[in-house]
Image (cartoon, grey):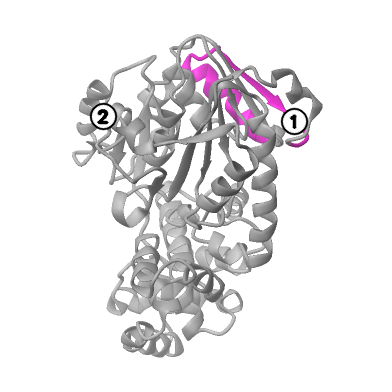
């Protein structure tokens, strides 16, 4: 790391480590303000900043108010998160910083004494997880999400075939491989500049975690059906469902955020999809939704959630969420799921999904829904995944975690409205 890169990283961390804004938003805004930074500079700055987030518990244990000592936090991230030897950055250090890093390395064994520092998880989350898991499980989870995620992409079957795309990518990244479960996925452990790649520009591929691809697979949409993506966001799963339907039928992509839906429109065009109809709604109770009551063959509810299954990509979330924000999310999930259920026709399918690992947001929400909606029944996810020849069995629910499956942490339940 150069002195200039270190200076920029420290300035970035001074804001990022307050956890007032999402880390990726802070990073994007910083790079917009510093347009002269080259690609290599941006890579070094971003990797070190996110290493600081992933190892914040250890940094905070050694450094009081890390955001106020952001240069030391950046140096600690290099040593703890990027495996840089102190001798490699000797020229960057003054005497005090050298002493600080030496003490930090000497403390490494101490960090394993407390679960919070060993698992790199805040105390509130450990307390919550202990309701369901033992300490070994918590440690395994924390360590699995402290490592950066690979780049997963989905091949758009309207435009290309996975084996053909994989062969092309392996010429550039020899470690590119087919994802083990999704029939459309490719994993790139060594990331490439995909947004300028020919295969991306022509709509052959989209960035999408393998777990997210499996959610679309569970929707099981068919040509000519009416499908609702109730919380569509920027539309990753919407696009996968559109390809599944071979561009036949109709997909309603609802979301409360106009900006997210605006991001979906160019992606639809690139993917060659014309059967998607994005529509902004004010809430799950928007009167415009009622026209679809009892008409949808499939409804996907990828509910607003804590996002704790995505900590490999969004390590700041564990510090931006809290027991209070979780309580609000639980209410919102319950309300959205009940509203979305009204759209499902008899014998139609409702898929409830989150990118959380907390049973409160997952199994417990589904159990509550079923107790309140006796006209719905649970379909076994294992049977659906076996029929799709995925080779994956996590029981009646889809439960994915980074340690076991190398995906983000996803949950899904497939529910069916009973035939009249």
SS label for mark 1: loop
The residue that disc 2 covers is 389
State the image coordinates of residue 329 (x, y, percent, origin top left): 66, 53
Q: Which mark is residue 172?
A: none
Horizontal side of 265 relative to 218 (left or right) equals right
From the viewer's perspective, tell me whether residue 15 is left or right of residue 200. right
Q: Within the image, what quadrant is residue 20 found in?
A: bottom right
Tell me residue 313's x, y (percent): 45, 52
Decide: few, some or many residues near mark 1? Use Cα within 10 Å; few <14, some 14-19, many ≥20. Answer: some
- At horizontal 22% and vertical 23% (from top left) the residue drawn is 163
239 up-or-down from 173: above or below: above
Would you call the spot at circle 2 few (<14 residues within 10 Å), some (14-19), or many (20 or more)?
few
- Whether 229 is drawn above or below 13: the answer is above
Of the numbered discs in the image, which one, if any, rests on residue 281? Answer: 1
Which of the 4 image quarters holds residue 336?
top right
Residue under the point 33% across and 83% down? 108
Segment tinted magenta in the rendering? 259-283
Quarter of the image with the C terminus in it: top right
Q: Residue at x 55, y 59 (%)?
A: 317
- Who is closer to the viewer here, 394 or 61? 394
Residue 359, horizontal then vertical, whole percent: 50, 56
User: Which structural element holds mark 2?
Assistant: loop
- Residue ID at (24%, 37%): 391
Work out how far the residue at label 2 is from the one at label 1, CA to CA, in angstroms.
Answer: 36 Å
- Nearest to N terminus: mark 2 or mark 1: 1
Q: Is residue 171 magenta?
A: no
């Amino acid at each position: 790391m150069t002195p200039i890169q270190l200076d920029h990283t420290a300035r970035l961390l001074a804001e990022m480590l307050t956890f007032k804004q999402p880390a990726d938003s802070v990073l994007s805004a910083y790079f917009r303000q510093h347009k002269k930074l080259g690609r290599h500079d941006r890579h070094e700055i971003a990797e070190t900043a996110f290493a600081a987030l992933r190892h914040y518990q250890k940094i905070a244990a050694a450094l009081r108010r890390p955001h106020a000592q952001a240069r030391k936090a950046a140096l600690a991230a290099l040593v703890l998160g990027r495996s840089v030897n102190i001798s490699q950055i000797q020229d960057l250090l003054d005497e005090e910083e050298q002493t600080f890093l030496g003490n930090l390395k000497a403390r490494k064994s101490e960090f394993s004494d407390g679960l919070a520092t060993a698992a790199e998880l805040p105390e509130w989350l450990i307390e919550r997880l202990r309701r369901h898991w033992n300490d070994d499980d918590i440690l395994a989870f924390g360590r699995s999400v402290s490592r950066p995620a690979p780049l997963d992409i989905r091949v758009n079957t309207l435009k290309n075939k996975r084996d053909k795309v994989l062969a092309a990518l392996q010429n550039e990244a020899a470690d590119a491989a087919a994802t083990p479960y999704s029939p459309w996925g490719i994993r790139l452990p060594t990331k490439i500049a995909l947004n300028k790649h020919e295969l991306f520009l022509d709509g052959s591929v989209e960035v999408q975690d393998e777990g997210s691809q499996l959610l679309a697979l569970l929707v099981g949409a068919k040509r000519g059906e009416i499908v609702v993506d109730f919380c569509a966001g920027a539309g990753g799963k919407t696009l996968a469902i559109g390809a599944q339907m071979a561009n036949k039928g109709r997909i309603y992509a609802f979301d409360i955020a106009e900006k997210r839906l605006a991001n979906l429109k160019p992606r639809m065009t690139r993917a060659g999809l014309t059967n998607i109809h994005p529509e902004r709604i004010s809430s799950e109770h928007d009167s415009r939704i009622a026209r679809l009551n009892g008409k949808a063959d499939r409804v996907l509810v990828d509910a607003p959630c804590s996002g704790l299954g995505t900590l490999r990509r969004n390590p700041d979330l564990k510090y931006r969420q809290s027991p209070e924000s979780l309580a609000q999310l639980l209410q919102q999930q319950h309300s959205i799921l009940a509203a979305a259920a009204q759209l499902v026709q008899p014998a139609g399918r409702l898929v409830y999904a989150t990118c959380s690992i907390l049973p409160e947001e997952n199994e417990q929400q589904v159990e509550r829904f079923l107790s309140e909606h006796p006209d719905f029944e649970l379909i076994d996810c294992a049977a659906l995944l076996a029929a799709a020849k995925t080779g994956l069995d996590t029981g009646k629910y889809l439960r994915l975690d980074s340690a076991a499956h190398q995906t983000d942490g996803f949950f899904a339940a497939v529910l069916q409205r009973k035939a009249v």
